[in-house]
Protein backbone atom coordinates (compact mmCIF):
# COMPACT_ATOMS: atom_id res chain seq x y z
CA UNK A 1 0.00 0.00 0.00
CA UNK A 2 1.17 3.54 -0.71
CA UNK A 3 2.78 5.36 2.23
CA UNK A 4 1.08 8.49 3.53
CA UNK A 5 3.98 10.67 2.43
CA UNK A 6 3.86 9.22 -1.10
CA UNK A 7 0.07 9.64 -1.16
CA UNK A 8 0.44 13.36 -0.39
CA UNK A 9 3.20 13.70 -3.00
CA UNK A 10 1.08 11.99 -5.61
CA UNK A 11 -1.87 14.20 -4.64
CA UNK A 12 0.34 17.27 -4.98
CA UNK A 13 1.59 16.22 -8.40
CA UNK A 14 -1.94 15.51 -9.63
CA UNK A 15 -2.72 19.15 -8.88
CA UNK A 16 0.29 20.41 -10.82
CA UNK A 17 -0.13 21.96 -14.25
CA UNK A 18 1.08 19.58 -16.91
CA UNK A 19 2.23 20.24 -20.44
CA UNK A 20 -1.02 19.20 -22.12
CA UNK A 21 -3.05 21.48 -19.87
CA UNK A 22 -0.68 24.35 -20.52
CA UNK A 23 -1.01 23.76 -24.25
CA UNK A 24 -4.78 23.81 -23.99
CA UNK A 25 -4.72 26.98 -21.86
CA UNK A 26 -2.41 28.61 -24.35
CA UNK A 27 -4.63 27.63 -27.31
CA UNK A 28 -7.70 29.04 -25.54
CA UNK A 29 -5.76 32.18 -24.68
CA UNK A 30 -4.76 32.66 -28.33
CA UNK A 31 -8.32 32.14 -29.53
CA UNK A 32 -9.81 34.61 -27.02
CA UNK A 33 -6.96 37.08 -27.57
CA UNK A 34 -7.50 37.17 -31.35
CA UNK A 35 -11.17 37.86 -30.93
CA UNK A 36 -10.77 40.54 -28.23
CA UNK A 37 -7.99 42.20 -30.25
CA UNK A 38 -10.37 42.51 -33.21
CA UNK A 39 -12.84 44.42 -31.01
CA UNK A 40 -10.70 46.64 -28.76
CA UNK A 41 -7.34 48.39 -28.93
CA UNK A 42 -5.16 46.16 -26.75
CA UNK A 43 -1.66 47.02 -25.64
CA UNK A 44 -0.86 43.52 -24.34
CA UNK A 45 -2.55 40.48 -22.88
CA UNK A 46 -1.25 37.69 -20.67
CA UNK A 47 -2.29 34.76 -18.51
CA UNK A 48 -2.29 35.78 -14.86
CA UNK A 49 -3.88 35.05 -11.46
CA UNK A 50 -3.31 31.77 -9.69
CA UNK A 51 -2.79 29.99 -13.03
CA UNK A 52 0.34 32.01 -13.76
CA UNK A 53 1.58 31.63 -10.15
CA UNK A 54 1.05 27.82 -10.10
CA UNK A 55 -1.35 28.12 -7.20
CA UNK A 56 -4.45 27.10 -9.17
CA UNK A 57 -6.10 23.84 -8.21
CA UNK A 58 -7.91 21.25 -10.36
CA UNK A 59 -10.15 21.00 -12.27
CA UNK A 60 -8.61 23.96 -14.08
CA UNK A 61 -11.17 26.68 -14.41
CA UNK A 62 -11.37 30.48 -14.44
CA UNK A 63 -7.88 30.93 -15.85
CA UNK A 64 -7.40 34.71 -15.76
CA UNK A 65 -6.42 36.58 -18.91
CA UNK A 66 -5.50 40.23 -18.43
CA UNK A 67 -6.21 42.55 -21.37
CA UNK A 68 -4.36 45.83 -20.97
CA UNK A 69 -6.20 48.43 -23.05
CA UNK A 70 -4.41 51.13 -25.03
CA UNK A 71 -4.61 54.81 -24.14
CA UNK A 72 -7.10 55.36 -27.00
CA UNK A 73 -9.66 53.27 -25.04
CA UNK A 74 -9.25 55.51 -21.98
CA UNK A 75 -12.83 56.76 -22.36
CA UNK A 76 -13.95 53.57 -20.64
CA UNK A 77 -11.74 54.33 -17.65
CA UNK A 78 -13.59 57.65 -17.17
CA UNK A 79 -16.95 55.88 -17.03
CA UNK A 80 -18.50 53.41 -14.54
CA UNK A 81 -16.86 49.93 -14.47
CA UNK A 82 -20.09 48.31 -15.70
CA UNK A 83 -19.58 49.87 -19.17
CA UNK A 84 -16.34 48.08 -19.98
CA UNK A 85 -17.73 44.85 -18.49
CA UNK A 86 -20.83 45.22 -20.71
CA UNK A 87 -18.72 46.00 -23.78
CA UNK A 88 -16.40 42.99 -23.27
CA UNK A 89 -19.40 40.81 -22.51
CA UNK A 90 -21.09 41.84 -25.76
CA UNK A 91 -17.92 41.22 -27.77
CA UNK A 92 -17.43 37.75 -26.28
CA UNK A 93 -21.10 36.80 -26.73
CA UNK A 94 -20.67 37.48 -30.47
CA UNK A 95 -18.12 34.68 -30.64
CA UNK A 96 -19.19 32.23 -27.94
CA UNK A 97 -22.94 32.84 -27.55
CA UNK A 98 -24.74 34.13 -24.48
CA UNK A 99 -25.00 30.72 -22.78
CA UNK A 100 -21.24 30.41 -22.46
CA UNK A 101 -20.40 33.97 -21.48
CA UNK A 102 -21.12 35.41 -18.04
CA UNK A 103 -20.52 38.80 -16.48
CA UNK A 104 -18.71 38.78 -13.12
CA UNK A 105 -17.83 41.69 -10.86
CA UNK A 106 -14.30 42.15 -12.26
CA UNK A 107 -14.21 39.97 -15.36
CA UNK A 108 -16.19 38.08 -17.99
CA UNK A 109 -16.20 34.29 -17.77
CA UNK A 110 -16.11 32.24 -20.97
CA UNK A 111 -17.11 28.62 -20.34
CA UNK A 112 -15.91 26.06 -22.90
CA UNK A 113 -18.45 23.40 -21.91
CA UNK A 114 -15.85 20.79 -20.89
CA UNK A 115 -17.04 17.74 -18.90
CA UNK A 116 -15.47 16.81 -15.57
CA UNK A 117 -15.48 13.11 -14.65
CA UNK A 118 -16.00 11.68 -11.15
CA UNK A 119 -12.26 11.83 -10.46
CA UNK A 120 -12.15 15.51 -11.40
CA UNK A 121 -10.37 14.82 -14.71
CA UNK A 122 -11.07 16.94 -17.79
CA UNK A 123 -8.92 15.20 -20.37
CA UNK A 124 -6.32 17.96 -19.91
CA UNK A 125 -8.68 20.74 -20.90
CA UNK A 126 -9.41 23.95 -19.05
CA UNK A 127 -13.05 24.60 -18.25
CA UNK A 128 -13.19 28.37 -18.55
CA UNK A 129 -11.27 31.62 -18.69
CA UNK A 130 -11.91 34.90 -16.89
CA UNK A 131 -11.31 37.84 -19.22
CA UNK A 132 -10.13 40.86 -17.21
CA UNK A 133 -10.07 44.31 -18.87
CA UNK A 134 -7.34 46.51 -17.38
CA UNK A 135 -5.70 49.90 -17.73
CA UNK A 136 -2.16 50.76 -16.79
CA UNK A 137 -1.74 53.02 -13.74
CA UNK A 138 1.98 53.78 -13.51
CA UNK A 139 3.58 50.48 -12.43
CA UNK A 140 0.20 49.02 -11.40
CA UNK A 141 -3.08 48.32 -13.15
CA UNK A 142 -6.69 49.35 -12.65
CA UNK A 143 -9.52 46.90 -13.20
CA UNK A 144 -13.31 47.41 -13.07
CA UNK A 145 -15.25 46.24 -10.02
CA UNK A 146 -19.00 46.39 -10.54
CA UNK A 147 -19.73 45.36 -6.93
CA UNK A 148 -18.32 48.61 -5.57
CA UNK A 149 -18.89 50.55 -8.82
CA UNK A 150 -15.24 51.60 -8.66
CA UNK A 151 -12.01 50.92 -10.52
CA UNK A 152 -9.61 49.06 -8.24
CA UNK A 153 -5.85 48.91 -8.33
CA UNK A 154 -3.99 45.64 -8.58
CA UNK A 155 -0.56 44.31 -9.40
CA UNK A 156 -0.22 40.67 -10.42
CA UNK A 157 3.58 40.88 -10.45
CA UNK A 158 3.66 41.73 -6.73
CA UNK A 159 1.33 38.83 -5.94
CA UNK A 160 3.52 36.50 -8.01
CA UNK A 161 6.70 37.70 -6.29
CA UNK A 162 5.18 37.19 -2.83
CA UNK A 163 4.06 33.67 -3.72
CA UNK A 164 7.52 32.86 -5.09
CA UNK A 165 9.20 34.16 -1.92
CA UNK A 166 6.80 32.22 0.34
CA UNK A 167 7.43 29.06 -1.68
CA UNK A 168 11.17 29.41 -1.36
CA UNK A 169 11.00 30.15 2.39
CA UNK A 170 8.92 27.05 2.92
CA UNK A 171 11.31 24.51 1.39
CA UNK A 172 9.50 24.79 -1.97
CA UNK A 173 6.38 23.20 -0.45
CA UNK A 174 4.20 26.32 -0.20
CA UNK A 175 2.54 26.32 -3.64
CA UNK A 176 1.76 22.62 -3.39
CA UNK A 177 0.10 23.15 -0.01
CA UNK A 178 -1.93 26.07 -1.40
CA UNK A 179 -3.16 23.98 -4.35
CA UNK A 180 -4.18 21.16 -1.96
CA UNK A 181 -5.90 23.63 0.34
CA UNK A 182 -7.85 25.14 -2.56
CA UNK A 183 -8.79 21.62 -3.64
CA UNK A 184 -10.29 21.05 -0.17
CA UNK A 185 -12.18 24.33 -0.58
CA UNK A 186 -13.62 23.13 -3.92
CA UNK A 187 -14.78 19.78 -2.54
CA UNK A 188 -18.47 19.56 -3.60
CA UNK A 189 -19.33 18.01 -0.21
CA UNK A 190 -19.35 21.57 1.18
CA UNK A 191 -22.05 22.75 -1.21
CA UNK A 192 -20.87 26.32 -1.57
CA UNK A 193 -17.14 26.93 -1.21
CA UNK A 194 -16.28 27.61 2.45
CA UNK A 195 -13.81 30.39 1.61
CA UNK A 196 -14.56 32.94 -1.09
CA UNK A 197 -12.68 34.13 -3.05
CA UNK A 198 -10.26 31.22 -2.93
CA UNK A 199 -7.51 33.83 -3.42
CA UNK A 200 -8.17 34.59 0.27
CA UNK A 201 -6.76 31.16 1.17
CA UNK A 202 -3.59 32.00 -0.72
CA UNK A 203 -3.37 35.39 0.98
CA UNK A 204 -3.88 33.81 4.41
CA UNK A 205 -1.28 31.15 3.59
CA UNK A 206 1.30 33.91 3.03
CA UNK A 207 0.96 34.62 6.75
CA UNK A 208 -0.22 31.33 8.20
CA UNK A 209 2.45 29.13 6.62
CA UNK A 210 5.40 30.88 8.14
CA UNK A 211 8.37 29.53 9.97
CA UNK A 212 9.67 26.29 8.60
CA UNK A 213 8.21 23.42 6.64
CA UNK A 214 7.86 20.72 9.29
CA UNK A 215 8.49 17.82 6.92
CA UNK A 216 5.11 16.09 7.35
CA UNK A 217 2.08 16.88 5.20
CA UNK A 218 -0.44 15.52 7.70
CA UNK A 219 0.87 17.72 10.55
CA UNK A 220 1.09 20.74 8.27
CA UNK A 221 -2.58 20.46 7.35
CA UNK A 222 -3.71 19.75 10.90
CA UNK A 223 -2.00 22.97 12.02
CA UNK A 224 -2.99 24.96 8.96
CA UNK A 225 -6.73 24.23 9.20
CA UNK A 226 -6.69 25.20 12.89
CA UNK A 227 -4.84 28.48 12.21
CA UNK A 228 -7.07 29.37 9.28
CA UNK A 229 -10.18 28.73 11.43
CA UNK A 230 -8.78 30.97 14.17
CA UNK A 231 -7.91 33.80 11.82
CA UNK A 232 -10.74 33.76 9.26
CA UNK A 233 -12.49 36.67 11.02
CA UNK A 234 -9.48 38.97 10.65
CA UNK A 235 -9.29 41.55 7.89
CA UNK A 236 -6.92 40.36 5.13
CA UNK A 237 -5.59 43.20 3.00
CA UNK A 238 -4.44 42.87 -0.61
CA UNK A 239 -0.82 41.63 -0.28
CA UNK A 240 0.21 44.30 -2.80
CA UNK A 241 -1.47 46.98 -0.62
CA UNK A 242 -3.47 48.28 -3.60
CA UNK A 243 -6.94 46.75 -3.86
CA UNK A 244 -9.73 46.37 -1.28
CA UNK A 245 -9.25 43.78 1.50
CA UNK A 246 -9.46 40.31 0.00
CA UNK A 247 -11.58 39.28 3.00
CA UNK A 248 -14.33 41.75 1.97
CA UNK A 249 -15.77 38.98 -0.21
CA UNK A 250 -17.38 37.31 2.83
CA UNK A 251 -19.91 38.68 5.29
CA UNK A 252 -19.97 37.63 8.99
CA UNK A 253 -22.32 34.69 8.36
CA UNK A 254 -20.09 33.30 5.61
CA UNK A 255 -17.03 33.72 7.83
CA UNK A 256 -18.77 31.82 10.64
CA UNK A 257 -19.60 29.03 8.23
CA UNK A 258 -16.01 28.97 6.92
CA UNK A 259 -14.71 28.85 10.48
CA UNK A 260 -16.77 25.82 11.42
CA UNK A 261 -15.86 23.99 8.19
CA UNK A 262 -12.16 24.75 8.72
CA UNK A 263 -12.45 23.51 12.31
CA UNK A 264 -14.16 20.36 11.09
CA UNK A 265 -11.33 19.81 8.58
CA UNK A 266 -8.82 20.23 11.42
CA UNK A 267 -10.67 17.58 13.45
CA UNK A 268 -10.77 15.21 10.46
CA UNK A 269 -7.02 15.67 10.05
CA UNK A 270 -6.46 14.86 13.74
CA UNK A 271 -8.57 11.74 13.37
CA UNK A 272 -6.67 10.63 10.26
CA UNK A 273 -3.35 11.12 12.08
CA UNK A 274 -4.70 9.07 14.98
CA UNK A 275 -5.76 6.22 12.65
CA UNK A 276 -2.27 6.11 11.13
CA UNK A 277 -0.73 6.01 14.61
CA UNK A 278 -2.93 3.01 15.46
CA UNK A 279 -1.60 1.25 12.37
CA UNK A 280 -4.94 1.60 10.52
CA UNK A 281 -3.21 2.77 7.40
CA UNK A 282 -5.97 2.08 4.86
CA UNK A 283 -8.50 3.89 7.04
CA UNK A 284 -6.14 6.83 7.40
CA UNK A 285 -5.83 7.12 3.59
CA UNK A 286 -9.62 6.93 3.29
CA UNK A 287 -9.99 9.73 5.85
CA UNK A 288 -7.62 12.02 3.95
CA UNK A 289 -9.39 11.26 0.68
CA UNK A 290 -12.73 12.08 2.26
CA UNK A 291 -11.29 15.33 3.56
CA UNK A 292 -9.75 16.49 0.27
CA UNK A 293 -11.68 14.73 -2.52
CA UNK A 294 -11.09 12.19 -5.32
CA UNK A 295 -7.64 13.37 -6.41
CA UNK A 296 -6.19 12.19 -3.08
CA UNK A 297 -4.91 8.70 -4.01
CA UNK A 298 -5.56 5.47 -2.18
CA UNK A 299 -2.86 3.59 -4.04
N1 LIG B 1 -8.75 42.51 -3.50
C1 LIG B 1 -7.84 42.47 -4.48
N2 LIG B 1 -7.01 43.52 -4.66
C2 LIG B 1 -6.08 43.50 -5.63
N3 LIG B 1 -5.89 42.45 -6.47
C3 LIG B 1 -6.68 41.37 -6.33
C4 LIG B 1 -7.69 41.32 -5.33
N4 LIG B 1 -8.30 40.11 -5.42
C5 LIG B 1 -7.71 39.45 -6.44
N5 LIG B 1 -6.72 40.19 -6.98
C6 LIG B 1 -5.83 39.81 -8.10
O1 LIG B 1 -6.60 39.28 -9.14
C7 LIG B 1 -6.19 37.95 -9.44
C8 LIG B 1 -7.36 37.11 -9.90
O2 LIG B 1 -8.31 37.01 -8.86
P1 LIG B 1 -9.06 35.65 -8.59
O3 LIG B 1 -10.15 35.90 -7.64
O4 LIG B 1 -9.37 34.97 -9.89
O5 LIG B 1 -7.97 34.82 -7.79
P2 LIG B 1 -6.92 33.74 -8.19
O6 LIG B 1 -5.67 34.08 -7.44
O7 LIG B 1 -6.77 33.61 -9.66
O8 LIG B 1 -7.48 32.43 -7.53
P3 LIG B 1 -8.36 31.23 -8.11
O9 LIG B 1 -7.47 30.05 -7.91
O10 LIG B 1 -9.55 31.20 -7.27
O11 LIG B 1 -8.66 31.51 -9.55
C9 LIG B 1 -5.53 37.47 -8.15
O12 LIG B 1 -4.64 36.41 -8.40
C10 LIG B 1 -4.84 38.72 -7.68
O13 LIG B 1 -3.62 38.89 -8.39
MG1 LIG C 1 -8.50 33.40 -10.95
Image (cartoon, rainbow, N blue to C red):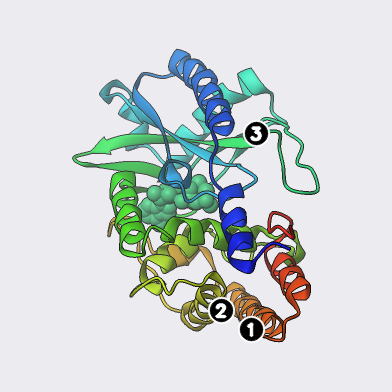
Seen from this angle, which residue lies furthest top? 38
Q: Quadrant of residue 214?
A: bottom left
The Cα–Cα distance between marks 1 and 2, rounded to whole angstroms, is: 6 Å
State the image coordinates of residue 287 (x, y, percent, origin top left).
Answer: 74, 73
89 vs 189, left or right, is left
Marks 1,2: beta carbons within 8 A: yes
The Cα–Cα distance between marks 2 and 3, rounded to whole angstroms, is: 31 Å
Q: Which residue is mark 1?
A: 270
Residue at 34% across, 45% down: 156
Secondary element at tag 3: loop
Q: Quadrant of residue 242?
A: bottom left
Local packing at callout 3 (Cα closer than 10 Å; few below 14, some 14-19, many 20+) is some
Q: Earlier in the sequence, mark 1 or mark 2?
A: 2
State the image coordinates of residue 225 (x, y, percent, origin top left).
Answer: 55, 76
State the image coordinates of residue 169 (x, y, percent, origin top left).
Answer: 31, 63
Q: Is residue 121 visible?
A: yes
Residue 222: mark in rendering = 2
Of residues 18 and 129, the one nearer the viewer is 18
Residue 124: mark in rendering = 3
Q: Quadrant of the N terminus?
A: bottom right
Q: Quadrant of the C terminus?
A: bottom right
State the image coordinates of residue 7 (x, y, percent, origin top left).
Answer: 64, 61
Amino acid sequence: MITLDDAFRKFRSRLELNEREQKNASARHTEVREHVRSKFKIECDFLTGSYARYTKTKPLKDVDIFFVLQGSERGYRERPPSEIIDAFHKALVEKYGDKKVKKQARSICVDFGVDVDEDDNTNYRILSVDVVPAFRAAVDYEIPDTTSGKWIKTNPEVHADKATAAHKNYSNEWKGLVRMLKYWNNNPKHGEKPVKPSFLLEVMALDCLHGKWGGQFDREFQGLFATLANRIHESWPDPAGLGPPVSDGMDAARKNRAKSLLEAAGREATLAIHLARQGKHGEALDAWRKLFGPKFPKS
